[in-house]
Every structure is written in C-alpha cells, then in structure tokens.
Image (cartoon, helix red, strand yellow):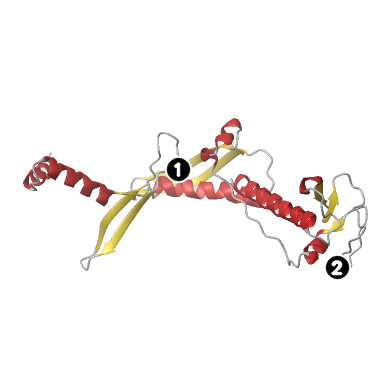
Amino acid sequence: MATSAVLPATTTAVKSAVTRLLHIAASLPDSPFHGIKPENLAISNGRVMQKNDQLPKVVGVSMRSGGQVTASGVPFEEVLKMANLSGITATGKTAPSFEDPKAKQYSLHSYGCHFAEVEWEPELARLRVSRIASVFDCGRIINPLAGRNQIEGAVVMGIGMALFEHTSYDPRNGQPINIQWEVRNTGQGLRITDVKIEGVSMVMTHRSDFNSYISSHGGKVEPLIDELEAKSNR
C-alpha cells in the first residue's frame, strides 16, 4: 500500500518539475535552448539537452552564469541561475484505487492470509492470542522496511479490531464506513450528542424526519410522541 500510494504521487511531482524546467530552458532569452520546443528537450544525468543530443546553437547568445555549453547538455542548475531561481517545486497526488477508473484494468493489491492461535481460559475469562502466522504474495517489494511495517501493522490492527473494536463495512465495495461519535461533558458525566455516518449527522437526520412526521400530522407534536413511545415499548 505504501509503494502504490507514494510512488505514483512522487512520479507525478517529478514529471511536473521536469516539465517546468524544460519550459524555462526553452523560454529564457539567454538560454542556448531558446526557441526550441520544450517537448524536444529532455533531462538526463542532471543536464538539459536536446533529444537528438546535438550541440545547442549558441550564436548571438551567452550564458550569464558563465557555464560551459557542451554536446552533453547544460547542467540544470545553470538553467536555474539564468532564471534567477533557487529551485523548482511541484506536487503530485495519488487517487484511491477504488476511485480511479483505470485501476480496474490492473491488479493493484497484494494477497495474503493470517493464521491465529487463540487460547481461552474459561476459569479466568481470559482470551489470549498466543501466535500469529502470516503469508503474503506481495510481488516485488521496493522498500523492505515499509513492506514489513505494513504486514506487522495489519496484524496489530486485526487483533485490535477482533478483540477490542467493531468496524462496519459497506457491503457494496468492502470499504470501512466512517463513523464519528460526538461526546460532550454535560456536567453529569459524558453523553453522546451526535453520531455521524459518512459525514451525515444522525441528529440532523432525525430532526428532519421528526419535522416531516409532525407536518404530516397537522403540525401537532403529540402524534410524534405517541409514535416514539410505541416504538420504545415494542
């Protein structure tokens, strides 16, 4: 997950930064690449050069930085100096795979299986996970440390969810449902004041339902109270 989330964003940011650098190299009047289309330029080994690797034309222009133009291109820091820039920044992001339509064409997830050995002592009412064995088909792991952390983190999270938590999943896509509990200290202890499911406030939803029920019964509150009491006694 770390590799699939970080690398695409990093690649996008790098490509964006390189594109900006090539546009600067092609647009600066003092640049040896002035007038050349940016798509005909490339960067390799830290140097800006033409894709056909020919010596850039320098007739009638000069480099203010004093750098030397060679057939192997111009160092990118020289291009930045000509533009009076200390660096180039760019950003990139990775869309969640379940939101990316292109992701459906590929297999982006690893597969694995967890085996848990659980001990139960009825005399003490103690449940203990004594051993976990995990097997994963991850493909090529680029960062072994991050890969190991992902597996160990999944084990710890799975034990916590099984023993101490409850997680609801959307049956349509298998994604966890985002539930937020709002708790306030009313002076007489903590009290749940609202529950938001996927950003939808249950307080506001109930308020809308109550208003609709009251409106459909002539604007009277008594029918709503009677209905709530009837439900609570069922």
| Residue 7 appears in the figure | yes
The residue lying at 66 percent from left, 38 percent from top is 139
Cα–Cα span, label 2 and label 1: 72 Å
Task: Answer few, some or many: residues within 10 Å of disc 2's Cα (few below 14, many 20 plus, some between 14 and 19).
Answer: few
Query: Which of labels 2 and 1 is toward the front?
Result: 2
- Marks 2,1: beta carbons within 8 A: no
Q: Would you name the residue on which mark 2 appears?
A: 64
Query: Is disc 1 placed on a helix, strand or loop?
Result: strand
User: Total marks drawn?
Assistant: 2
Q: Name the amino acid type tagged 1.
A: Val
| Left or right of 39 on screen, residue 215 | left
Residue 195 coordinates in the image, percent (x, y): 30, 51
Q: Is residue 49 above or below residue 101?
A: below
| Left or right of 211 on screen, residue 93 | right
Query: Is disc 2 placed on a helix, strand or loop?
Result: loop
Nearer-the-camera pick, 153 or 194: 194
Q: Would you name the residue on which mark 1 appears?
A: 118
